[in-house]
Amino acid sequence: MKTNYHTHTTWCDGTASAADMVRAAVAKGFGELGFSSHAMFPEAALGWTLTREKIGGYVAEIRELSRRNADSIRIFCGVEADYVPGAASPDRAAYAAFGLDYLIGSVHFVTGADGARIPVDMSPESLFAGIRDSFGGSPEAFVREYFRLEREMAARGGFDLFGHPDLVRKFNAKRPWFDEGAPWYLEEIERTADAIARCGIPVEVNTGAISRGWMNDAYPSARFRDALRARGVRFVLSSDAHSPDALDCAFDRFGRCEDFVAPRWTEPSAPGADALAFPPEKG
Ligand SMILES: [Zn+2]
Ligand SMILES: [Zn+2]
């Protein structure tokens, strides 16, 4: 069954409405579609993330689309929840009040010793300026801190799908700034694979950088996927779509080479209930 649980809309930084994304998913033959607007609860918010004021409207709209399209597609309502230590965390307690189905846990920001919050994937310019100003000009220091946060998020757990675990690669194909074959980098992905395996949360194989033209590969890299697969980690194929055309970007390529698990979903959780978890089984 064709599925995608990583979908953005105009509720955050996507370019299309949720209704347009549903129409496209049905046309493309998806059996299930999950929405995952950006969110930074409990404390933080940015211009494109859901706020406490907006999240009720978001959930209500997705539930209505789910009812209206029940004959053609199953629709789920989640969020892509940031991990920013001290400000935002993808844990069910922080999101329990909103009645969501699931949480994707993602790291998009790395904080420097000076307290500056550097966006990992906004633009090469902001990334490189942040490394220069807050990480002593050391790409290795920045990347190691990024993976340390990934491991910390894994150790805390409380979410359902591990988002793009090597997002630091996003600009590396077009604007190379570190060596993905360096021993220190390989050590980081091995250590991070250990942490992800321990938390038991499935990892997405995310084609979002392909649809946006940054690289011709998914997150995580083939090397990282091998490390995860060797530890028994489960994979879920995601497009991280920000537009209707991207909903199944490169799915033919990665759907063939990966042993993907289609998660079994339970009924939407009631407000206050735990978010649903992916089943602990191998596909
Ligand atoms: Zn993301
Ligand atoms: Zn995303």
Image (spheres, rainbow, N blue to C red):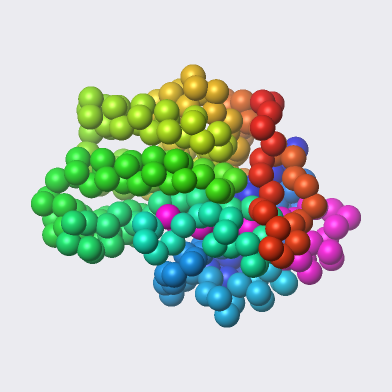
The picture quadrant where one finds residue 140 is top left
Q: Is residue 21 visible?
A: no
- Horizontal and vertical percent position of residue 77: 68, 59
Where is the N terminus found, in terms of image quarters?
top right
Question: Residue at 31% across / 46% down in the picture?
Answer: 146
Question: Residue at 33% across / 41% down in the picture?
Answer: 147
Report the magenta residues as a range. 62-83
Question: Residue at 58% across / 62% down in the picture?
Answer: 95
Question: Residue at 32% across / 42% down in the picture?
Answer: 148
- How many marks can you see? 0
- Horizontal and vertical percent position of residue 106: 46, 51
Q: Determine if the magenta segment contains residue 218.
A: no
- Horizontal and vertical percent position of residue 133: 14, 59
Q: Nearer the viewer, residue 224 or 201?
A: 201
Q: Determine if the magenta segment contains residue 69.
A: yes
Residue furthest right in the image: 71
